[in-house]
Image: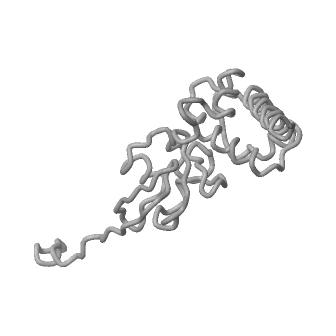
Amino acid sequence: MGQASNTETNSIPSPSKISIELRLNGASTKLDVAPWTSLLDALRDHLDLTGTKKGCDHGQCGACTVLVEGRRIVSCLTFAVMKDGAEVTTVEGLATNGALHPVQQAFIDYDAFQCGYCTPGQICSAVGLISEGKAHSADEIRELMSGNLCRCGAYPNIVAAIQQAMSRQVEDTRQGALP
């Protein structure tokens, strides 16, 4: 008594998959996912892009931060189907023609990581922060990066790396504007 018969078990519908397309790191990528698949799980489990880390899986640590349409989001709280057709950039997609993104290089220059687990999310968040143009001081960087946690406490080096990348961007802009 109380146990389901084989007939009852077989009548449960199987979950359907939904086909989506992402512009992922500059390339069109199609995949079939269950409607409840997070963008994080789609990236890691379906596309083998393991640079994006699963930290808390509750949107509180920032380890899973990626860029969607250039804006930083926590991918663990975003359903992949919600981003059908969107431009998604992961840490793997930041380098160009084998050259590291300025933020990636700054993290190396300033040793802005220890264990490295949070680093991909920190880097993607920093790229988004710089493009937002809202941070102009170390205090503003700290505030705007507060959603990305580092258990190792590399915060001073992370802030310094972001400041270097911001300075480099300003410098590159000036050089491009000169005749």
Q: Residue at x 49, y 38 (%)?
A: 51
Please state, as top left, top right, bottom left or bottom right, where the N terminus lies in the image. bottom left
Horizontal and vertical percent for residue 102? 68, 32
Q: Residue furthest left?
A: 6
Horizontal and vertical percent for residue 23? 50, 56
Front in this rendered view, residue 106 or 50: 106
Whether 46 is drawn above or below 158: the answer is below
Front in this rendered view, residue 104 or 79: 104
Q: Residue furthest front?
A: 179
Whether 150 is drawn above or below 74: the answer is above
Horizontal and vertical percent for residue 119? 60, 34
Q: Residue at x 42, y 54 (%)?
A: 42
Please state, as top left, top right, bottom left or bottom right, where the C terminus lies in the image. top right
Say left or right for 13 vs 167.
Answer: left
Q: Quadrant of residue 91?
A: top right
Q: Residue at x 64, y 31 (%)?
A: 104
Say left or right for 6 vs 25.
Answer: left
Say left or right for 17 vs 60.
Answer: left
Q: Quadrant of residue 69?
A: bottom right
Horizontal and vertical percent for residue 63? 58, 42
Q: Residue at x 58, y 40 (%)?
A: 94
How is the protein colored in the picture? one colour
Q: How many marks?
A: 0
